[in-house]
Amino acid sequence: MKKSLLFIAHFMFVFVSSFAQSVGQNADGNFSQYLNKTIVKNITNSSQGSAITSFNNEENTVGTRFLFNDWVQGDSVINAQGVLINTTGFVFNYDKLTGSMLATQDKINNMLVSSNGIQSFVLKSMGKRYFFEHVKAIDSIHFFLSLAQSDSKYSLYKHFITTYTASDFKNLGVIQTGKEYNEYKDDNKYYVVDESNNTITQLSLKPREIKAFFASQKQEVDIYFKQHKNDEIDDRFLAGLVNSLNQ
């Protein structure tokens, strides 16, 4: 699988030099053509919704809708033709509920970025780089967060899936039913692409399932689990395992 960026460490990416030179010479300065004029709404305030002015601060709400709590820097936005897009002056966020990239220039008027015109992009927060891309072999519609990449072994991707459930609490006197809070619930999916044979497998964060998938490398996997026995099995754990197997 041809890669524009190479995963070096957790969430750290760099351009392949020849690709960077190519897109740098063909930078597209018209980022506005990729913006959808739709204003992203806050669905927890009213049935009609209101424009979002800040992130993840809804009262009486559990979980988060947006990947970041504030606008973040972005770069390396590549369109469907492989051309680098000039995004100077814009800041971004990622809406986990809709799977959409958001952009703004004034941090007041936000707009959706049309996903069908973008191949990949990088968002930067707290010293980390989050590389999103379309992975046609898995799904040509949604963006996937790249957690590990290899041209010859394993690539690991995360698909953010977040659903919203409104409070349905009812006080019937003696009996009370439902939840007193709104909730954004994550049910993310993980995909491993075996680049050696171009196969795709959906993987959960359950230890038994992880070990079964990498059964052919049982010794290496067992060593990694032993070395990280006190770690939570999450994105970082799985990415670390895949990267260790890619060495």
Image (spheres, grey):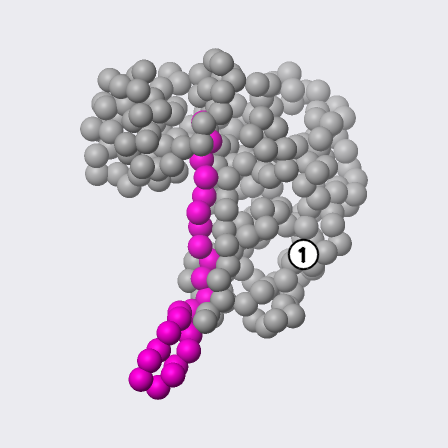
Residue 16: in sight, yes or no? Answer: no
Q: Nearer the viewer, residue 47 or 73?
A: 47
| Relative horizontal placement of residue 133, taking residue 241 as reference (left or right) | right
Q: Which part of the image, by quadrant, shows the C terminus?
A: top left
Q: Is residue 132 above or below residue 112?
A: above
Instruction: Residue at 50%, 51% (x, y): give it.
Output: 162
* Residue type marked 1: Asn
| Relative horizontal placement of residue 84, taking residue 246 as reference (left or right) | right
Residue 46: image location, x then y, percent = 59, 72
Residue 222: in sight, yes or no? Answer: yes
* Badge 1: residue crowd in 10 Å (few <14, some 14–19, many ≥20): many
| Relative horizontal placement of residue 39, taking residue 185 as reference (left or right) | right
Give the residues in magenta: 169-192
Q: Which part of the image, by quadrant, shows the N terminus?
A: top right
Q: Which residue is mark 1?
A: 110
Instruction: Residue at 43%, 58% (x, y): give it.
Output: 63
- Can you tell which quarter of the image residue 141 is in? top right
Q: Nearer the viewer, residue 121 or 47?
A: 47
Instruction: Residue at 38%, 83% (x, y): give it.
Output: 172
